[in-house]
Amino acid sequence: MTKMALGAHPFLLGFEQLERLVERTAKSDAGGYPPYNIEQVSDREYRITLAVAGFSEDDLAITVEDRQLVVRGGRTEPEQGRVFMHRGIAARQFQRTFVLADGVDVVGAALENGLLHLDLERAPQDKIVRTIAITRDRHGRSDQQ
């Protein structure tokens, strides 16, 4: 049995870009740092929580770029004069990317006890019904011209 790509399925027209976006995001997930949770708060609300112990608000940047939520972290703590007997707290830079569906917006972010909470909300969708007129050819011309 051959595996069919998402963009190649006959019922999903115009989703090729989404498939590329998902592949690119999956590749950026390598390493698994920092760990995170995604929870559904309600029918239209979600919360992403990232464990960012040791990072301050100034060390974090949150952006939305082309339907992708991107969280970047980088600490600028000077290491001079510090001698570690053991170093188990990660202080490395990171970038975590999440793909957002159309209509999903980031409505807030809060840093609390080493956890970065990102609140997302899906706007209610209006059901739009359009009637498409049938013409003689695809350019809208009829035989009476």
Image (cartoon, helix red, strand yellow):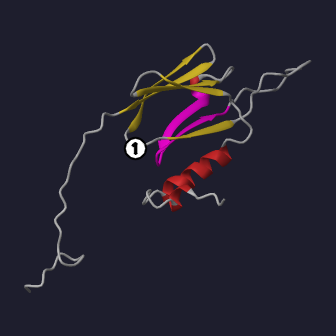
Q: Secondary structure at mark 1?
A: loop
Q: Quadrant of residue 53?
A: top right
Residue toward you, 44 or 31: 44
Q: Position of residue 17 (x, y in %)?
A: 50, 57
Residue drawn 17% across and 73% down?
A: 135
Residue 35 or 125: which is nearer the viewer?
Answer: 125
Q: Is residue 138 left or right of residue 69?
A: left
Position of residue 71 measured from the top left corner of the image (x, y, whole percent): 57, 35
Query: Which residue carries the number 1 mark?
Result: 102
Residue plotted at (72% across, 42% down): 30
Q: Residue at x 33, y 34 (%)?
A: 123
Region rendered in magenta: 58-74
Give the residue type that dot 1 points to.
Answer: Asp
Image quarter of the N terminus? bottom right
Residue 68 falls within the magenta-colored stretch? yes
Quick check: is 21 in the magenta stretch? no
For the C terminus, give its image quadrant. bottom left
Position of residue 138 relative to residue 60, above or below, is below
